[in-house]
Image (cartoon, grey):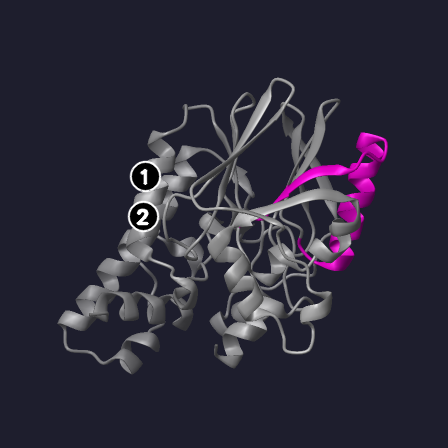
Amino acid sequence: MSTNRREFLTTATLVLAGGAFGRVALAASGQTQAPPPAPAFTDLRGNIGIFTARGGTIGWFISPDGVVVIDSQYPDTAAACLEGINQRSSKRPVDVLFVTHHHGDHTAGLVTFKPVTKRIVAHVKEVEAQKAATKPGSEATAVYADRTFTETWTEKFGPETIEAVHLGPAHTGGDAVIFFQRANVVHMGDLMFNRVHPYIDRGTGASIAGWIALLERAVKGHPADTVFIFGHAKQDWKVTGGKAELLFMRDYLTALLDYTRGEIKAGKSRDEIVKSTSELKGFPDHGPLVPRVLTAAFDELSAK
């Protein structure tokens, strides 16, 4: 694993809040940085809400039948999240904590939740990737999911059924989508970056083409009024939305592949393409292209 990737997965102090990406990545791309906002709980519907602070958006479900959390951010923000959950649940244990994927801004807080959580669930590939990303010497204190699945995992809490589904390689090789069937709310994890250039983790099996197909499948598989929770969003953009945002993300990824394919066809080298600061036509909110997305697109299109 490269040093850059390990730093991306494990650095807790350099990440923007409320769904923004990472200070290191944004600084490199020239995108606007902002100080982390105060931790915030937002109710959605059907006993479901979100918690935003630093790192990927945390989802929560609190009812008389059970307490469920999705992702964990970092140890300090996880503590703030847990405090709020305890207030809302009268300090009930967390029945299940779902991990959408292994990146540090979604899993570092597992150490905070572990003592009060009955089960931590993740796709088997994401547990493997998290273990591979763990810093040497810290394995003894690292916390991983203790339950894994390959295709689906289902839990029922009273009238609500919660399903974790793996729809194929996309942002990583084992992303999970968490679907609250009765409330019709879907936590997309980092399968959704709202108006910000995503991280495409080819080192663990990511696929831009697979990501495009996954987003189309998610749109077709849910009703028009589905509320989707996003992993990250650009400053002043929301971390929740509907099908239109998923299709916009699909179109961005399609445009990224088309742009890179055109540059390859024009005879440009990998180094020349990666240095491009052009904007993708139709996607001005994302700002200039950045090396991480161009590298991933070039390598995917050039893979044999």
Which of these two is toward me, 181 or 134? 134
**Horizontal and vertical percent for residue 297?**
30, 65
Which of these two is toward me, 7 or 138? 138
**Horizontal and vertical percent for residue 136?**
63, 78
Residue at image location 32% in from the left, 39% down from the top: 216
Which of these two is toward me, 183 or 254? 183
Q: Is residue 153 magenta-colored?
A: no
Residue at image location 35% in from the left, 44% down from the top: 214
Q: Is residue 94 left or right of residue 86?
A: left
**Cβ–Cβ below 8 Å for labels 1 and 2?**
yes
Q: Give how far apart the Cα atoms at labels 1 and 2 are.
A: 6 Å
Is residue 282 in view?
A: no
Please tell me in which quadrant of the rendered image residue 42 appears.
top right
Range covered by the magenta-colored residues: 73-100
Q: In this view, does 104 lie to the left or right of 152?
A: right
Residue at image location 38% in from the left, 36% down from the top: 218
The residue to which callout 1 is attached is 216
Q: How many marks?
A: 2
Residue at image location 58% in from the left, 56% down from the top: 20
Q: Is residue 84 magenta-colored?
A: yes
> Helix or strand or loop: what does disc 2 sit on?
helix
Task: Work out which quarter of the rendered image holds the C terminus and state it.
Answer: bottom left
Decide: few, some or many residues near mark 1? Use Cα within 10 Å; few <14, some 14-19, many ≥20.
Answer: some
**Horizontal and vertical percent for residue 35?**
69, 61
Please tell me in which quadrant of the rendered image residue 107 appears.
bottom right
Q: In this view, does 103 lie to the left or right of 211?
A: right
